[in-house]
Structure formats: structure tokens, C-alpha cells
Image (cartoon, grey):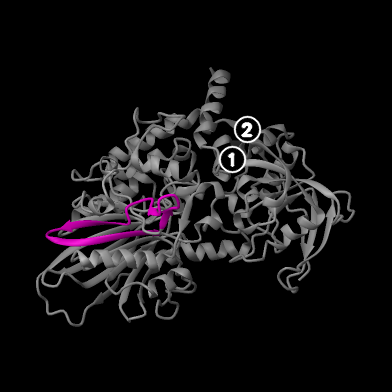
Amino acid sequence: MRSKSVLLAATVAATFSVAAHSHDQYSHSNEQDKYEERLEGIGARNKAAQRLTWRDSRWKHDPVVNIKLLGINDFHGQLSPRAVGARPAGGAAVLASYLRAASEAAKDGAIIIHAGDHVGASPPNSALLQDEPAISVLNQLANKQCLPVKLFRKLPYEIQAYTQPRCNIVGTFGNHEFDEGIGEALRLVYGGNHEDGPFLEKRWQGAEFPYIGANVIDESTGRPVLPPYTIKVMNGVAIGFIGAVLKETPTIVTPTGVAGLKFVDEADAINASVKQLKRQGVKTIIVTIHQGTGQASYNGPTDPDVLPPSGPIANIVKRLDSEVDVVVSGHAHGFTNALVPNNAGKQILMTQAFSASTAYGDIDLAISRKSGDVVEKSAAIVTTWGDEGPGLVPDVKVAELVAQADERVAPLVNRVVGTVTTALTRTESSAGESSLGNLIADAQRVTTDAEFAFMNPGGIRADLAAGEVTWGELFTIQPFGNDLVSMDLTGAQIRTLLEQQWQGQAFPKILKSSGLTYTWDNARPVGDRVTQILKADSTPLDPAATYRVTVNSFMAAGGDGFLVLPLGANRVVGPVDLEALVEYVESLPQPFSAAIEGRIVRSN
């Protein structure tokens, strides 16, 4: 995958001379839009704000240490504010203000925990600067006891666990940290300028807080690529933190991004670290993991006892050692605030705080000084509203950082490349077609002079509003910097590709197509749903004939489960997908439009 800063360097130069890119990827049907509203909308946030509490019935009210954990997840470089419903929410400066206020209110100290995807799939003001600003936001929140982790990189993991006992931040990797490979992920953590830098800092120093991860293994060494755990000491009490990422990461990341890595079972890796922590006398243990699910509010509050968390994360938590007290989760972009019993009956508190800076998990722990165990724990998911409370006074230093990032990318981001007559969205017809998907697929086919093009829905990250279209808007839609790859496929292989939209998928991933139309029957079994494929001239696709097909490099490597694509012959790498989209939009008669036009037909 090509770095975003390559795009910045090339296109900013051109702009100045003229003016002197894994959910986690979701399909966006109408039902999906309604689901996401339940997942992240006002109703869900009202439910999430209700505090959930557990208390050990054996607690004799001996002295305790009161610790606050502040959990965030899926920040995705969201430096700028967003809207939730009709209200402003989030943005780095507003989030920082909330986290500072909550930390200051903590009786015996607070720890900020992020559960991965802090970078990647980011807006231009972070992504074009290789997401260094996203890390810098947390560096601004780090206390005086936090030091650059590069200082400790060569130490054994067992020693690194003790190097920052009073640092107030800890993080882990999500799947998007691997978008540009483990080398770039570790550069962000340990420092060193990117080949296209420097950006906002003359010398990138890396993270000033520990990153941990127990289940990502370097195949060449057999060792985790990050320290598996770290230990904090809060008012005399030791607390262990263990990191992990979903083991399915290789299925949702470009294969080159995870080359040389092995993702092992999450619960097994976590429990191995728990065993080590227990040997060191640590009895309060927190897991930060990039895997999760979402609770949803339908008609009024949702009772967590009626709809408990489910899916892979629930199975992971059930298998955890009983010494684990809290799991800060991510990946699903919804909220979780629930007590999940493990197989031994231990009630483990699990949280997730929506996404993109719009919330945090406010978790309170009471830890017995006598036993070192958690005797009371509670959590609420707090939305970071910009029009009330700490949101009324955004953090000044973080706001300055965001302003610097905005200024750096403004010449490129604000360049107008066209005008669209109506909004183009990811919203799908019942068959799976979308107007924005059609535009992108057309751009890829025309740019590479292919017969057909296919675009995965998860790679389309935002809608396009009516009116002037800027480069920045198109970047937000396609932020991954994937190359376009043209290849030869037979008609039979194209049919296999279309059948793989349902095969082995957690939900259908309906490809956006250009150059052909096809019909599928939902009543037919998976693997035999496509009933007709027609070329642009309305003639049937010949199974034995060879056709030129274009997809992005993520798909070309088998991403999203489209396993037939790595078999394509005569592969040629073309331009970056974003460049193709920008050039295509600029080439269209203005103003332009696109529509759902029956390229995909569903018969049942």
C-alpha cells in the first residue's frame, strides 16, 4: 500500500505551482444505515450513558484505592469535530478536554486506554501526515512521568513492563495500524521520520506512552512485535494492562500489511500474559483489545441482560482468566457497557465507546489495599458533546496541533475538482448497488481501460454531498491509498468472484461494478446465487473467454475474502485509486452526477 504522504508531496507541489485509503468495513444498505443509527445515534448514546455497577458481595469495606480508566477506541485520526444527530461532538481538542477533566476528578489517578485503530482510515488532516498528529494528540495528554517508548525498545519485554509505572496512557494496535505494514506501525510508535517527512515535527519522536500487544507474533523471531503487557502503579497498587487485536486481522488488511506476522488466538495470548502478571503479584488486570460488538437501542433502552454482547468478543471474554477485571474493546464502532461472565462465572466488565473521538468509557475501580483485587467497578459511556460541559472549552494545545495540521494540508484538501448535482451516497438498493459505488467503479474501469471494474463496499468510507467537490472530500471517501491492479480473469473466474460476495462473509459484501450487469437470487444457496451476467452490449459473459478486470490492491491480494483475485493473470499495477477518482471527476462534463441504474438486479 502506498503511503498517503506520497500523495501529499506530489499533489501539494502541483497545487502550489498552479496557485502560486476490517469493521472493519461495512456494507451500506438502507437497513445498514438504520442499524448504524441504532448503533451510534442518540438513542444508543442515551443508553450508553447509564452507569452500570458491580460490587463484590464479599467486600468488607476495607480501605480501597479509587482508580479511573478512560477508554477510547477507533479514533481513526479524527482531529476535527463531527455531528451526532444535530449536535457537535468529538474532535481531538474536545475529546482531550473531556479526558483532562475526568482525569482531574479522579481521586487516586486515571489511566487513558486506547483499544486500537487510533490511526488509519483517517481524514486528510491526519492521514496525509502519516497519522503522526493522531499520536501527538495522546502525547499532549501524557503526564510528566511518560517518556518516549523508543528509549526502552531494546530492553527485554519483562523489563519494559516496569519502565513507565506512573505514565497515564497505554494503547494497543487495531487492524488499521497494519494498513501500511508493521514497519510503518512501529515507526509511529518508536519514532523516526517517514521518507516523505518531516511533517509537523522536525524529528518524529514516536509515542510517549507504552504500546502493548500479546497476540501479534513476528514469524522470524517467534516474539510479539510489541511488549505483551505493562504494569502501572497507582497509589501503591499494581495494575496490569494486556493488549490484543482480533486474530482475523489478516482477512481485513492488505496481505502485504501483515507479511511476516502471525496473529494467534486472543484469549490464549491474553491468558499467558495473565499468568506472568499473577506470578509477579498483580491481581488487578485490564485488557485492551481491538475486537468488539455493539449494543443497540431500538425502542427505548436496551436491557443488557436481555441482549448480552455476542460474537467473537463474547467468546474471548468467556475464556479469560478470572483475574481479568475489565476489557476495553473496540472495532465495532458502537457502544458496549456490560458485565460478561467468563466460564468460571467471574463478572468481567466490558466497554466500548463508539468511535472517532465522539465518546469515552468512564470506568471507576475500587481496589482493595488488603487483597489487591477489584471489589467494585462501574462504567458509563460518555459522549463528548461540543456544546456542553468540557466541550465548551476545547483543549488549547491540542487545538493548536489540529490547526497546524489543517494549515499543512489545506492547499491540497480545499482544491475544487468538480461539481456534483445531487448527493452521491453509499446507500444501497435492495440488490446492493449504490450511486457512489457506481461512480468509483466507473473511474477505475475508465482510468485503466479495462472491460470491467469492481469496488469493495468497505473501501468507500464516506458519502459525497451535492455541490462543489473538493480533493479532500474524495480523499475522505477513499483514504487508503490502494493501487489499482488490472488483471486477466476468465468469465468463470468472474462468476466465482461474484459468488464470493456471500461465501465466508459475516455479511454480504456486494461489489460495486462497472462494465457489466448481473442478477442474483437471494433464495438460492450460497455459492450458486448469480443467475445471469451480461456485458455492456447485453450479451452473456462467456465462461471460457478472458476479460480485463480492474480492482484495488487490497482486493487483488485476496482482501475481504475475494480469494479468486490473486489468481488473476497478467497483472499490471496502475495509479492510486484516489488519483483515478480525482482525474475521472475532473474529466466529466460539469456539473456531473451518478445514479443507481440497475447494474445489479435481485430477483428474490
Q: Dot 2, how many residues are within 10 Å of its Cα: few (below 14), some (14-19), or many (20+)?
A: some
Residue receiving disc 2:
417
Question: Start and end of the magenta stretch?
Answer: 216-244
The amino acid marked with disc number 2 is Val
Disc nearer the start of the sequence (1/2): 2
Query: What is the x, y in percent for residue 77?
Result: 43, 45
Label ID, residue 23? none
* C-alpha separation, residue under disc 1 versus residue under disc 2: 9 Å
Residue in front for this viewpoint, 48 or 365: 365
Task: Tell me if label 1 and label 2 are in contact, CB under 8 Å.
Answer: yes
In the displayed image of the protein, which residue is found farthest to the front? 221
The answer to whether residue 289 is above or below residue 604 is: above
Residue in front for this viewpoint, 417 or 196: 196
- Left or right of 459, for residue 198: left
Residue receiving disc 1:
474
The answer to whether residue 8 is above or below residue 26 is: above
On the question of residue 85 being in view, the answer is no
Query: What is the x, y in percent for residue 583?
Result: 67, 33
Q: Quadrant of the C terminus?
A: bottom right
Query: What is the x, y in percent for residue 425?
Result: 63, 51
Q: Quadrant of the N terminus?
A: top right
Label 2 sits on a secondary structure element that is strand
The answer to whether residue 503 is above or below residue 252 is: below
Q: Dot 1, how many residues are within 10 Å of its Cα: few (below 14), some (14-19), or many (20+)?
A: many
- Left or right of 170, for residue 119: right
- Left or right of 217, for residue 165: left
Give the main secondary structure, helix, strand or loop, of the magenta stretch: strand
